Structure formats: structure tokens, C-alpha cells
Image (cartoon, grey):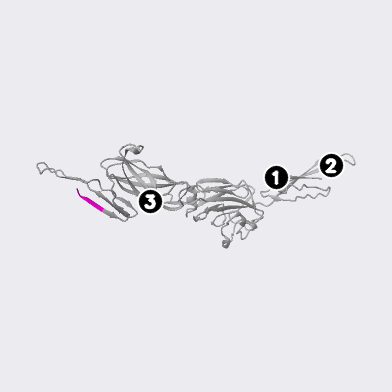
Amino acid sequence: MIRRGFVGALGSAVSGVRRSFTPKRGGSPAFRRAASAAVVVLLLAGTMVVPASANVGTITISTQTPPTISAGGTATYPVSVYNSSTGPHMFAVTAVTGVSGLSVVSNGCISIARHATTNLGTVRIGTTTATPMGTSTITLTVTEFTSTTSCADINAAEDSNTAATSLVVLPPLTVTVYKAICPSYSLVPANENPSSIDDTGGHWAQLNTTAQTAIAAPSDIPAACLSVAGWTLQFTDTAGGRVNGTNTTSVGGTPVVLNPAQIALARTGTGLWVNEVTQASAGFGAIRCYNDLLNGDNSENIQNVPADVTQVYCIAFNVAPASLSMTKTASPTTYNAVGNSIAYTYVLKNTGNVTLTGPFTVSDNKATVTCPPTPASLAPNATVTCTA
């Protein structure tokens, strides 16, 4: 028996070489030289190790896609395996170890011919909220099954080998979508010339390039720009691209916990785009999301959010001047004698898109009008009735 050893940077192992020799017809008696196993090579990040494994040869694990995920998400790894056994068998990733909260979601079970290298496909590794944040080293175990048709029976496993790779898990990220309606364009942040109209007909032209900084929280919004509900903001993969989330604003903002795919976009240079679905009767002002610039469109990009930031804001500004209508009615509508009494009612309605603050008063040169002390404010489409 002849043994040949190889020591790599990750450790050492010994593997044998099995060779058989049969003399030609009429030659000397048969001579046979044998060893314990076939040569197995594991290649990882430029380091070669020869482990004591018979049939699962070189395992190559490509970079995780997407490159980063959040806890509770799924990492996908392209994995290829060399079958160094004497015949075709089924191969699959059967285990993952290294940090807590990991499981094999999809093993990529596939048949590999003898002495062939084949991709197992997209091997998916699931994480939980217990999976540590940051970059971790994990180890995938590839198993060869005696079956040539199935990877279902782990008891039929013939051999296995391992390879290590990295897992990048980012912390959760919440985006609060906030809708602010201002009574004038002059109150929209960074609007340098609120009286101008650009070539698209918008009033958000000539934004101040020196003031295009992030809005950290709603406390930075001018007090006269009120938070409103019922406006839709969509998350998209690209500017105007595939919608991957739709959210409706509430008064004070709506916190949206991003899913792993959205976090992967927001925390990288690719970016998560936010698009406002505009509504009638409210001219568009501007939209600003996290560190993106306030500019003249209704789509913004949340990108390169650091791992230590877990809460960002996306604030859409619109402009709707205050609007109040009044309907006056008399009862009765006619009179036929001196001394008849006529009662008047005055219904005030907020016909704009911003909440109006009281007190509310009505002046009539024919009567003294009294308005109730409540409500103290009128939301859009709300009414208050005064009498005389």
C-alpha cells in the first residue's frame, strides 16, 4: 500500500490512491497495488486540502446571492461538486453549521456522473431572527447517496464532504412613509424659487442644491405642513420598475418593516426606490427618502443604508392651499307678515386636502352668527354648522 499526503493552509489530511494492474496475456502473474480510497480535493478561497473522503470530490461554493440578507431571510448559494466515485450517484447539501438559526431550505439534489463536476443548483440556506448579524463563516455538508434517483433517504448516504463559505446577515430596517401637505410651495424644503414653474409644469423647479440633505425625522418638517393619511407610496426595484411593496400613509407616518429582499436593495448601492401615487386636487411638491436628494420627481432611492441604521423616513410633500366652502340656508324660505322669524344655518366644509384649525367664524350683515367651539379643527371633507 502506498499513501500520499498533502497539507493545506486549512489543515492536513491523508488520502490514498487506488490502482490496479493486470498483466497482458501470457505475461507474469497478476500484480495488484491498492490503497484505501480515491483522491478527494476540496477547493476553498484558493486553499487546497485533501480530506479523507472517498467519493465526494471538489466542492465549489460561489458567492451568496443576494450578497447580503436580513435575519429571517434566505441566502442562495450556487454549489458544484465533483463525483470521484466509481459510478453515477445522487448528491445534495444535507446540513449547514457554523452559527445559530440556519437550515437547509433547498438542497439542490441532483445526479452526477462518474468523474464529472456538476452544479447542484441553487442551494438555499434559511436564517432566523436568532442568526447573528454581520459576516459569519458557515460550513455546508455535501452528501453522496447510494441511490441513483433520490436524495430522500439520508440513511442511504454513502459518503460526505464539507466546504466553508461566508454568510452576511444585516439587521432589520424600517421605513416610515410620511405624507405632508403644505399650504404653499414656499414651505416645501429646499424649494429655492417657489413661484417658478419648470418645463414639466411642476412648482418644484430650481431646488436649492446646497440644501438637499436628508430629513432625519418628521420633526424636521415645517409645522404648517400637516401629516395626512390615505396616500399610497410604492416600493420598486428600480425607478418606475417592478413594484415589490405598496403602503398607505397614516397620520404621523406609517412604519413599514422591510422584507429581506427590500433590505438587500436599501443597504446596497442598488437602492430601494419609493414612488408616490399622486392624487387629484393636490399639486406635487417633492419627495425625499433617507439620504437621497430632494428633487423634482415623485420617485426616490433609499440606498447604502449603514448596518447600524434601523429606522429611516421617506417623506412626500404636496401642496394644497386651504379651501373652505360655505352653504347658507334659510328656514322658512319665505315670509308673509311683519314679525315672522327666519332661522339661518351656515355649513362650513373643508374642501381642501389639509386640515383646517379653528376657531371658525361667519360674518353676515343681516344676522349675528354663532359657531360652536367644537370641533377645534376640520379634516378634509369635514363640516361644522353655524347658526343665526
Secondary structure of the residue carrying numbered label 2? loop
Secondary structure of the residue carrying numbered label 1? loop
First of labels 2, 3 by sequence position: 3
Q: Which amino acid type is shown beneath numbered disc 2?
A: Ile
* Residue matched to label 1: 382
**Residue furthest toward the left?**
26
Residue 68 position, x and y percent, is 45, 51
Classified by dominant secondary structure, the portion drawn in magenta counts as: strand
Q: Distance between the residues labelled 1 and 3?
A: 60 Å
* Residue matched to label 3: 165
Kindly identify the residue that appears in the image at 81 percent across and 42 percent down: 330
Q: Which amino acid type is shown beneath numbered disc 1?
A: Ala
Q: What stretch is highlighted in magenta?
A: 1-5
Kindly identify the residue that appears in the image at 52 percent across and 51 percent down: 173
* Residue matched to label 2: 342
Question: Which of these two is toward me, 46 or 249?
Answer: 46
Please state if 129 lies on the left or on the right of 178 as rendered. left
Q: Distance between the residues labelled 2 and 1?
A: 26 Å
